Amino acid sequence: MTQQPGKILPRSFFNRSTLKVARDLIGKYVLRRTEHGAMAGLIVEVEAYVGPHDLACHASRGRTQRTDVLFGPPGLAYVYLIYGMYHCLNVVTEREGFPAAVLIRAVAHCKPPAVPVLIDGPGRVCRSFDIDRTLNRLDLTLGEGLWMEDRGERITEADVLTAPRIGVDYAGEWASKPFRFRLARFTRQAKQKGTSKR
DNA sequence: AGATTGATCCAT
DNA sequence: TGGATCAATCTG
């Protein structure tokens, strides 16, 4: 992995079609700085939640206190608690007033010169990066503790796999749309036996 | 396959 | 105000 200075992804990056933002986030970096230290992770897997018509998108059930941030300006963090135990990190996309976001599902945690460690699963990503609801609504374009960077990784179409989103079977026809994007070289090893579901 | 865990949403 | 639901994960 090349190590470039890294440019913070600006609001204009997120103020685009959610599917394009999701695809383009693959190969970018999540950066975190706390009083305990700093860390960086190569974005390996994301999911797009493309708007109020998308039945898997939280905003499809209207604007509530929880979903209000999705209607805000692009580049804000949407962090929520799921199953009472885990957090999920999203970044708001598209123009203000249009509720959509991209979920960060997996990163490769980089502590050079060590080999990157794959952190697979949105709850694990947030646990590793010490992300909780106190970061909800944080502006990710400011570099204030949590932000995203372009470090010059070159990702081609062949490097990115698409698949249906996970855990949204309730969403009817929207459940099967290929709105999940994953860096191909981090694809899970197919289990030969056993029940690998979801 | 089942347990865990608590915020959120909406119907009662 | 209660109860179903949930962009998940861990242990069997």
Image (cartoon, coloured by chain):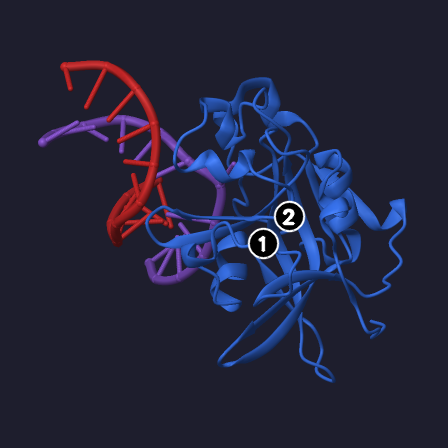
Chain colours: A blue, B red, C purple
Q: Amino acid at mark 2?
A: Gly
* 3D distance between C-alphas at marks 1 and 2: 6 Å
The answer to whether residue A5 is left or right of residue A139 is: right
The answer to whether residue A18 is left or right of residue A165 is: right
Quadrant for the N terminus of chain A in the image: bottom right
Q: Amino acid at mark 1?
A: Asp
Label 1 and label 2 in one chain: yes
Rendered residue at 48%/62% (across/down) = A131
Label 1 SS: loop
How many numbered discs, if any? 2
Which of the two residues, A97 or A5, is positioned nearer the viewer here?
Answer: A97
Q: Quadrant of residue A61?
A: top left
Q: Label 1 crowding class (10 Å Cα cut-off): few <14, some 14-19, many 20+?
A: many
Q: Earlier in the sequence, mark 1 or mark 2?
A: 2
The answer to whether residue A193 is left or right of residue C8 is: right
Rendered residue at 70%/32% (across/down) = A178
From the top left corner, tell me how far across and down residue A122 is, in percent: 53, 53
Label 2 SS: loop
Q: Is residue A11 above or below residue A185?
A: above
From the top left corner, tell me how far across and down residue A54 is, in percent: 59, 24
From the top left corner, tell me how far across and down residue A94 is, in percent: 68, 35
From the top left corner, tell me how far across and down residue A46 is, in percent: 66, 47
Kindly indicate whether the residue at mark 2 contacts the one at mark 1 (C-beta within 8 angstroms): yes
Chain assignment, label 2: A
Q: Is residue A115 above or below residue A105?
A: below
Residue denoted by label 2: A75
Chain assignment, label 1: A
Q: Is residue A156 above or below residue A112?
A: above
Rendered residue at 54%/23% (across/down) = A55
Which of the two residues, A45 or A133, is positioned nearer the viewer here?
Answer: A133
Residue denoted by label 1: A139
The numbered dot on residue A40 is none
